[in-house]
Amino acid sequence: MSPHASHAHDEHAAHGCAHDHDYDHDSADHDGPARPAWPRIFGAVLLVLLLAAVACFVQVRVGEATVITRFGNPTRVLVEPGLAWRWPQPFEVAVPVDLRLRNTSSGLHDVGTRDGLRIIVQAYIAWQVSPDPQDIQRFMRAVQNQPDEAARQIRTLVGSALETTTSGFELADLVNVDPGRVRIEAFEQRLQAHIADQLAQTYGIKVVQVGIERLTLPKVTLEATVDRMRAERETIATERTAEGKRKAAEIRSAAERDARILEADANVKAAQIQTQSQVEAAQIYGKAYASAPELYKLLRSLDTLGTIVTPDTRLVLRTDSAPFRALIDGPNPPASLTRQAGQGHD
């Protein structure tokens, strides 16, 4: 037998065996009961319906809103958290919109004050998409629901608003050593009023808060501020010096007036005392003269000499005239003593 004949015989045998195997398998299938196909069909339909039902529900999360679009056009806005119904894709698509609070910085801006000085200001803006359905759709149309693009638009708007707002304030209203003169709060309120309406009407954005994040002075402004503060301090010092001099003059004038009043009162009292003393002295002199006239004349002459003559005075006068006669003649004895002496001789 040739090799080719053996190979053909082997292939025929293998084919025969395979044929017998298939025949036996088919015989076994026909022997058992036939299974119905409707349970599998029902299960498949039920699964499809379940998947379709799941695809029709959309979940609205807390802090978000969901915009339902039909073929790209917004049809309704879902704001309340929970489950809502929509047609499955591609008929309707649910687009989430973030309503959470965001913070955007304006960056540093070189702006001018009302008094012509330059300052560097940086503001922050706390904002969020307004939960109103119309504002949500406005936000989607304006920035295609892109918060980063909204933040860029906010920075641009705040930059121009800072220039406008700062021009209404002087540097002393923003930077001052006196807390009572600082008007930062009024500045922030005016800045918020400048941007709030435009952001709401154009982008559907609600501005929650606006504040000054940083405020610095350039070198030129700092030098001008120092010079101005120095001039103000010098003016204040001059005013206070003048005020002190004025008060000192008032006090001095009042003291001099009081002194004059006291002096006048003292002079009046002294004159009264002097008058009283002169009256009393006259009475004493009168009594002395009545009792001893010669002694009175002697004492008056001595008083006169004590008044007009000092230790350095040199006088050349006659001694036989008053008041020097008393130095030569001496006092005359009283008449009573003369009579007593005459009676004694008798």
Image (tube, rainbow, N blue to C red):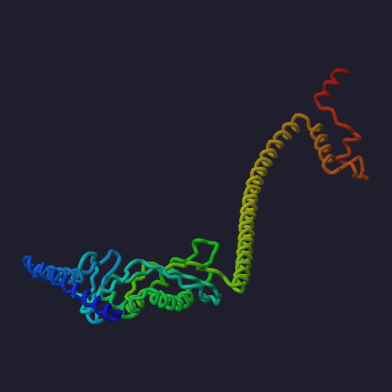
Q: 31 or 21, which is in the foreground?
A: 21
Residue 142, given in percent of the width and then of the height, sits at 33, 80
Residue 194 in view: no
Residue visible at 81% across and 34% down in the picture: 299
Residue 99, given in percent of the width and then of the height, sits at 32, 68
Q: How many marks?
A: 0
Residue visible at 78% across and 30% down in the picture: 292
Q: 203 or 314, which is in the foreground?
A: 203
Does residue 6 appear to the left or right of 173 in the view shown?
Answer: left
Residue 159, given in percent of the width and then of the height, sits at 46, 77
Residue 212 in view: yes
Q: 180 or 254, which is in the foreground?
A: 180
Residue 49 lies in quadrant = bottom left
Does residue 181 appear to the left or right of 6 in the view shown?
Answer: right
Relative to 84, does residue 268 appear above or below in the rendering?
above
Does residue 199 appear to the left or right of 310 in the view shown?
Answer: left
The residue most toward the front is 1
Residue 221 lies in quadrant = bottom right
Residue 216, given in percent of the width and then of the height, sits at 55, 69
Residue visible at 36% across and 78% down in the picture: 198
> Split into 4 quadrants, where in the image is the N terminus?
bottom left
Relative to 248, does residue 139 appear above or below in the rendering?
below
Residue visible at 33% across and 79% down in the picture: 144
> Split into 4 quadrants, where in the image is the C terminus?
top right
Q: 158 or 35, which is in the foreground?
A: 35
